[in-house]
Structures are given as structure tokens and as C-alpha cells.
Amino acid sequence: MGETTQELEQVARPRNVAATAPRQSNGRQSSAAKTGERSIDYDSLGIPKAAVPSFEEAREMFASLGRKRTEEVFACGEMFAKVRGKAPSQEAFERWSKQACRLTRRGAGNYIAVHNNLRAHRKVLVECSMPAAAMYTLATAEQELVASVVADLKAGKRPTVREIRAMVSGDTHAAQSDPADIAGADGLRALSRAKVQNGVPILVARLRDMLSDINEALEPHFQGKNVAKGALLAKVEHPARRARSELQSLALFVEPNSQSSETWRVHPSIFPHGSQWGKVSLVLYTLGGRDDWPDAGELVD
């Protein structure tokens, strides 16, 4: 893991950390019950009765996902495109999406545009955790520009939402201001801003994926069964190591190792003792080392 004795001694290991709250049961409720809204008057919208189950499924799925990650934006776009094809008119679909999902005309259109115009690159965009706002903009671009952005993603580049908007609008001046070419302290600040803009969404998406895996692994426990420790280790151990390194890279500077006379040896500094991000860092450290995991019988606690 690369941590020093100094770092581990300065951060106290928390005790009796509460288990992550389990996800809700997979048992489906009516979408009206989930959203707390009145039912939709499909007759007034002119939507055929045979198509109503598809619309209700789309409504329920959209309500259950909360904040949409890359994969979920594609899933919603696919579902909305499906039900729009069953609506008697575009106007009826827009009225339904406003009532059922509280989406504006543009909001619903963004999801469908992502599905229609970017689905050929879905795998790459999901792997790169491209933010929804960036995809909404990219979905309006010509396919040549889309292919160019995807090629950059494959090469390890992470264009910001602002940069993608500049490319789509044709504002090449705004798009070509590479922070790596800006001199002096201003350049360092620009590089730092770009790092945060690109890095925070990636880290947050990784943490969300880990949390989802942990919640899923805990479900058997609430049914009186054992948690599959080995399967969970395989899913979260390495992402936890990477997430901790990303957190340190985004939030901390470096400092010399005080326990060594070789002051040129540096490592990431640590969060203040007892701080909330310090606790997050320690949790990620524990998750990232299978030797620190408790036995399967004690894993839930």
C-alpha cells in the first residue's frame, strides 16, 4: 500500500463503525407510491392501455435511480426512446414525461439524444464515467467530433464539460487553452482546476460503485445468510486502493518522512486527526488490504 508507520500511527482506527445501510428490497412498489404523486391520467394523454405498463415501468425506473451515473443515463435514454415510440404524439410524450418524471421537454430529449447518438460509444463513455452534462452536449455534435472525443478518452484524456461545449460550438479558442501550456503560477492554478474538474467525478463514481457493491453484498445478511467475503473482496479491494490514491492526489500535498533522515523522500501528507476525510481515507485503506478484513462472521459489523 505504500503507507509509512508515521501515517498509520497518526490516524486512529475507528471502532464499531456502523454497517452501510442496506438497499431497499427489490420488491416493486407502484410508481405512484414511490414518488408520492397522484397517478397519471393516461386516457387524457391518449396513450393506449396496452402501452401503459411500459410507461409505468419507465416512470418507476427513473424514480428509483436518483442521481444518474453514466450507465444510468444511457438506460434512461433507452427506456424513454422506447416509450416515446408508443406515445400517440411527441406532445403526449412530453406531457407524460413532465407529469411522471418532472422533466422538461429538453430534459427528456437529452436522455433520448444520448441513447440515439452516443450508444455506439456507450462502453467507452461508461468506463470513463463521463458526466451527464458532458454527454448531453456531446450528443448534439456531429459524429466526426464524437469519434474524436471518444478517441481522446481512449488515449487517457478527459475533456471537461466546458471544453466539449467549446468544441461543439466551434469556439476553438476556448477549447485550445491547454493548462499545460500556461506559464507561471497561473498555469499551476489552471492545472489544479483541471485536475479537480476531471478527477472529482471519477473518484465519486468509483466510490458510488463500491458502495453499490457493498450494499448488494450485505443483502444476504438481512436474510439470515452469510456475506460472501471472497466475492466482495474481488470487487472492492483494488478499487479501494485506487480511490484512496485518487483522494490523496486531489486533496493532499506531500511532506518529508519525519522518521527518515533522507528528507528528499516524500509521501502524501495526512488529513487532520479525527477529520471526516481522514476517516474516509482510513476506511479505504482497510478495504484495500485483505489482511485487514475481519473474518466472514464479523464482516457485517
Image (tube, helix red, strand yellow):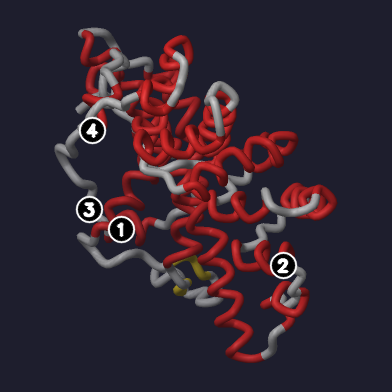
Q: Position of residue 298 (x, y in %)?
A: 23, 22
Residue type beneath disc 3:
Ala
**Going 26% across and 8% down the picture, which residue do you hit?**
225
Dot 3 or dot 4: first in sequence order is 3
Mark 4 Cα-neighbour bin, 10 Å: few <14, some 14–19, many ≥20: few
Instruction: Say few, some or many: other residues with alpha carbon within 10 Å of mark 1 (under 14 / 14 to 19 / 20 or more).
Output: some
Label 3 with label 1: CB-CB less than 8 Å = no
> Can you give x and y, in whole percent of width and height, for residue 36 in the image?
20, 32
Mark 4 vs mark 2, foreground winner is 4
- In the displayed structure, does residue 293 sit left or right of residue 185? left
* Circle nearer the N terminus (1, 2): 2
Q: Which amino acid does the dot numbered 1 rest on?
A: Trp
Q: Which residue is mark 4?
A: 37
User: How far apart, in angstroms, are the residues tagged by discs 3 and 1?
Assistant: 13 Å
Q: What is the residue that sits farthest to the bottom in this orientation? A: 184
> In the figure, is residue 134 to the left or right of 116?
left
Secondary structure of the residue carrying numbered label 3? loop
Residue matched to label 1: 277
Figure disc tally: 4
Query: Which circle, 1 or 2, is nearer the viewer?
Result: 2
Q: Nearer the viewer, residue 30 or 288?
A: 30
Judge the density around disc 2: few (<14), some (14-19), many (≥20) Cα neighbours within 10 Å: few
Find the distance from the CA under tag 2 to the CA under tag 3.
51 Å
Q: Residue 244, percent across and down?
A: 44, 51
Q: Please identify the quarter of the rendering in which residue 289 is found.
A: top left
User: Which residue has dot 2 on it?
Assistant: 169
Residue depth check, mark 3 versus mark 1: number of the one nearer the observer:
1
What's under tag 4, amino acid-wise?
A: Glu
Under circle 1, the secondary element is helix
The residue located at (50%, 39%) in the rendering is 239
